[in-house]
Amino acid sequence: MTDNSLEYKAPTEIKSLDVISTYELEKEAEFVIPKGGYDYISGGSGDEFTLRQNTESFNHKGILPRVLADVENPETQTSILGHDIRAPFIMAPIAAHGLAHQTKEAGTARGVAEFGTIMSISAYSGAKFEEIEEGLNGAPRWFQLYMSKDDEINKDIVDEAKADGATAIILTADATLSGNREKDLRNKFVYPFGMPIVSRYLTGTGEKMSLNNIYAQSKQKISPKDVRFLADYSDLPIIIKGIQTAEDALAAIGVGASAIWVSNHGGRQLDGAPGSFDTLESISKAVAKRVPIIFDSGIRRGEHIFKAIASGADIVAIGRPALYGLALGGWKGVHSVFNYFEQDLIRVMQLAGTQTVDAIKHTQLFDMK
Amino acid sequence: MTDNSLEYKAPTEIKSLDVISTYELEKEAEFVIPKGGYDYISGGSGDEFTLRQNTESFNHKGILPRVLADVENPETQTSILGHDIRAPFIMAPIAAHGLAHQTKEAGTARGVAEFGTIMSISAYSGAKFEEIEEGLNGAPRWFQLYMSKDDEINKDIVDEAKADGATAIILTADATLSGNREKDLRNKFVYPFGMPIVSRYLTGTGEKMSLNNIYAQSKQKISPKDVRFLADYSDLPIIIKGIQTAEDALAAIGVGASAIWVSNHGGRQLDGAPGSFDTLESISKAVAKRVPIIFDSGIRRGEHIFKAIASGADIVAIGRPALYGLALGGWKGVHSVFNYFEQDLIRVMQLAGTQTVDAIKHTQLFDMK
Amino acid sequence: MTDNSLEYKAPTEIKSLDVISTYELEKEAEFVIPKGGYDYISGGSGDEFTLRQNTESFNHKGILPRVLADVENPETQTSILGHDIRAPFIMAPIAAHGLAHQTKEAGTARGVAEFGTIMSISAYSGAKFEEIEEGLNGAPRWFQLYMSKDDEINKDIVDEAKADGATAIILTADATLSGNREKDLRNKFVYPFGMPIVSRYLTGTGEKMSLNNIYAQSKQKISPKDVRFLADYSDLPIIIKGIQTAEDALAAIGVGASAIWVSNHGGRQLDGAPGSFDTLESISKAVAKRVPIIFDSGIRRGEHIFKAIASGADIVAIGRPALYGLALGGWKGVHSVFNYFEQDLIRVMQLAGTQTVDAIKHTQLFDMK
Amino acid sequence: MTDNSLEYKAPTEIKSLDVISTYELEKEAEFVIPKGGYDYISGGSGDEFTLRQNTESFNHKGILPRVLADVENPETQTSILGHDIRAPFIMAPIAAHGLAHQTKEAGTARGVAEFGTIMSISAYSGAKFEEIEEGLNGAPRWFQLYMSKDDEINKDIVDEAKADGATAIILTADATLSGNREKDLRNKFVYPFGMPIVSRYLTGTGEKMSLNNIYAQSKQKISPKDVRFLADYSDLPIIIKGIQTAEDALAAIGVGASAIWVSNHGGRQLDGAPGSFDTLESISKAVAKRVPIIFDSGIRRGEHIFKAIASGADIVAIGRPALYGLALGGWKGVHSVFNYFEQDLIRVMQLAGTQTVDAIKHTQLFDMK
């Protein structure tokens, strides 16, 4: 993989997918994404204990079917930070979609926009804002920031994101350093293309650079002051992503965060942590509806979306499954994946006797532990 | 499988079986039932987590052997809703027995009737009432209803079931939509024959239709009013099937249900739910003997029957194992399966020191969790 | 196996064994014992869930190493019902040792006697008392009784056992019917030889009879009256074997039992029961040292003996491992197995800082659940 | 292996290692260390239940990522018993490094010394003090003692260790007898070389002797008096190694121990014990900072070091991974392993939001059970 920038051939096919299971998508994606890229996308850190816990922890709570509930055609519409969205899930910020498909983030953006929800644009995007706009075509977007050590550069990046139309800034706070991604180390993985948004603070464009190298050039020493700085400078809602404790949620709200994003970065950062779902309930109790909660890490089924919302999330974010859809079918594949989640969630809502997203929030789960 | 109606060859053999284990029956049945039918019968929804939990959850409670108990020749006779039955188990309602054997529901009915317990006739039966009567030959039967969106049709169906001699109506309330049956989706499974009882409200007979399609034409919006309507119109006991919470049990009783059927539809509907057995004890405490409780989902051994009754069930229902018996031996196979459960239950009763079904109800199980 | 009486060739070799692990003995024994006999000896009932739990339940409690304990050369001697024995374990009663070795119970008896502990003679022995005496050569023995339905025959059997020198009667109370031994059913297993002690109440000698058949001819309806009868008639200590509840232990003591034998019959009777070890602590608390407690089911290591004694047993009994020793090396093999347990127990006692069997009883185990 | 002293060829290569995972090192080491030596080093006792628990028990507690923590370049320096060390881990005492590499303990010592932490020299070293000094080159060292039955010999050994510059005596108290090392028994493992330090109390040098044989010639009857004797005679801090209970920790402190070493000997002594990590928290609460706590058994990742310190350890000790490094790369391999642990710990500290070792101690772990 040392020279993978010379050889990296991302998939190019664009087609709708007949999604039966997102686990199958992962297996199929392994056949079309080059190994270095596939391992980067699918892998976690250390023993991948936390990666596995992310999905397994959903089995710690059970949904009880409710009957005679007078439910028909459940409604999935909801709203978040002023946006009305078609279903209670959005696209999570992920770096380097170009590993999965040659249309890069523009492909994902189009699938998300045509479905009717919010796109999160990563600071480690391989596409420029204007390229992504081709896919979004005016649809809502949030911008996820990895800060530079230099706040003047941060201002420039925020300015650019605002100019592009971002309606919120997601500050990723759990990745001030790369997790222990053993697969990437074994593959000697480097990005096969540059990252135009953050290249202004990198020595180089990002191309042929390792994740460790790029993270090291970003800001490690993130503190509540940075939240204040971003809120004041951007005048946009600031969402703090990577929260796993009630203490951090309250601290973030205390310095002006407009939303909390409960996540363990898809099991890619600190291994030996509980599944993200196992941390959600206590955080949501502490937050007590002062700000909305977005949840990710491990969502693979409609049941998972339901359980997260019943445990206090307002919406969830879809990560890897969308990228597998992108790899297998470009923007149409992404669209198919979002449709799948919607259909699966509707079925679960019907069988659980819940007519609306609000009704899910009032559902009591069964403790399986 | 697209043209499976042309090719579907259900087994035809009629013979007694030497049943050593119902798990073995399942393996053997896989060899004789065409794949689409076998997957439909044996499969569950989603990850099949709940399907597996249904049997595994019995291991959450242990039966303690009781000695010096002065027991000999335990007696399995009991009664339910006015019927004296030979043993505390009946036939569960299952759709489309014709997938397992060419004698369809008539085969099952004869095996059940010759054993001496109650047959449940599914609204999604592939046989007509008069065909099933050939097997039942006057033996007791309950009718399980999937409601039409049109109550006039529901009245017609209830009238027909009453005319056929049904002594109770089972309203299945947990299947207002098909569960996420991935195997059926992969197989593109459609029923190879029609469903005469509900065909009056289908566009088509049911033949070459998928489960999703058929459920969609049934009534989703089931509410307590439907229980009242059925009780008033039929003047028969109404049993609400698919109860997994104390709240729903009490609600059903409140609107006139004559019995509660605790079930998660054999793990075929909402995945990510606990094993049905894990929900039984709290429901039975809430019901507090106001109405009888029927239990299903996961019964494969005499121990399971014992544990369910010791946890509050009055009787249990046998589903898939009976259909495997039907596939392997027609009515004689069904008869063999029911005999097996009786013998296995008698053994467990003897070793647990319980002379009667009532004594089982007073047994304290050991908490294994 | 239908004609296995014609062909059954039990092992004949006599040699000392280098026992590293009793699990290995089981694997090695499988090569020398004919399949029907091996499955009969090693198998359990039903799913073999309880059989597995018997050994796995020892992992629910941990032994904590204790240091600076001033211990050297731990002493394993103890006494039970008036007998001084070399180590806190005896031979469990097992039927039909002739399945494992042509020297039958005489071989086991000699190994046990030369080691220096108590032999339990099963009523379902394939050898006569006088044959077993050749191995025992005056060493202590207890007699285990499966009662006849006819008390006059029971008196005769007890008379014979007393005449042979039995110093206690073990009444097996948990096997009034055969457990669900699926392996035996598949093998159509029948005993290849008769059972001279109980043949007086069988139709036939036991030869070519199944376990079900033999149990059916024994007494099912065992009650406290039988304990009284045996105690009064025999004037020997009566030990009730197969106790798994505090209630039954107290009931047995109330009608004159001189000792309680906590056992689930090695997982051969009621499946779906907890591991025998998991039931021990609460029983021993209820018994409160009024009578001694013997424990079996799952003992494979010195750690297991230690944990059982620390949980309230006075001694334990060794079953299958001794029969594997018999199969592999005749009386010398049995002797090797008993020596192995002694050495392993001494090591555990040293590392746990316990000088005597009494010190083990005062050890607090660590709760691993 | 009977003649393994004639044939034993330990590895000789000296090179730096690219350590991605210590689990991989173990697999790679299996290819270069002769089987008898590899099994001796890597194996545990009995079922290896406790060996597995040692690493698995770390999953009973989760580290929660902490964000906005204002952390950059975490500092790993700490001090223990008067020594400033580069990171909160030292080399554990292990016998017979010559099994892993021909440079024996001198190789390990150099790797440890160049990294900048403390070497523990085992009484069962295959190298003499002066040979080890060649590697240590003045770096700090502690001496681990297996006592002779003869205190005059113990005095001589202590005198020699002091003369060599040992600044503390580690009294191993949990190995007064060999654990049940089945692999060694199967391999008929004997040491291929002598043990010069303890050879003064052995009949023979240790060469061609089994572990059982050597332990048997050491002192079994260790008591609090021995702690007093060593403290008084040596005038050095005495560390009691092998503590698994609060009671023993308090007893050791009561007779003059200067530190407690929580360990179960890497799962090599008493099997059926909990993972060492599972015992740490209650011990550290009882010790209440009166003396420092050293922890070992199961450390394979930075997360494990973090969790042990967060549960009350002041430092941890590295055992097998260092020996695998030695086998694969001599002193440079050991150095690589220590560097790996430092880097991995720094990453975990950053992601957990902890700037210093002291901050780790104030971290609250998440209960995963």
Image (cartoon, coloured by chain):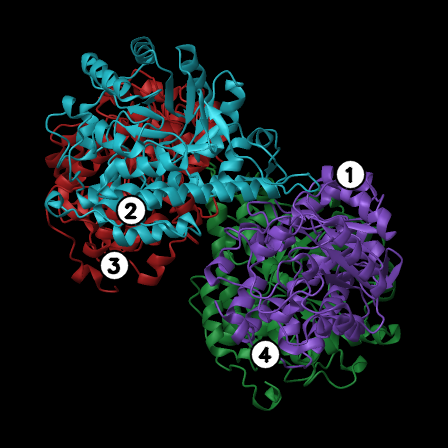
Chain colours: A purple, B green, C red, D cyan
How busy is the neighbourhood of tag 3: few (under 14 within 10 Å), some, or many (20 plus)?
some
Provide the chain ID for the residue under circle 4.
Answer: B
Residue B20 image-quadrant placement: bottom left
Mark 1, residue position: A250
Q: Residue furthest top?
A: D232
For the residue labelled by badge 4, is the local secondary structure a helix, a strand or a loop?
Answer: helix
Q: Which mark is residue C35?
A: 3
Q: Nearer the viewer, residue D358 or D271?
A: D358
Q: Horizontally, is C239 left or right of C116 in the view?
A: right
Q: Amino acid at mark 3?
A: Lys
Mark 3 or 2, closer to the camera: 2
User: On the rendered image, what quadrant is the C terminus of chain A found in?
Assistant: top right
Residue C110, percent from left and from top? 14, 36
Per the model, the C-alpha gap separating discs 4 and 3 is 39 Å
For the residue labelled by badge 2, is the local secondary structure a helix, a strand or a loop?
Answer: helix
Residue B90, percent from left and from top? 62, 61
Q: Is residue D242 above or below residue A144?
A: above
Marks 2/1 same chain: no
The answer to whether the residue labelled 3 contacts the one labelled 1, judged by CB atoms less than 8 Å apart, is no
Provide the chain ID for the residue under circle 2.
Answer: D
Mark 2, residue position: D327
Q: Amino acid at mark 4?
A: Leu
How busy is the neighbourhood of tag 1: few (under 14 within 10 Å), some, or many (20 plus)?
some
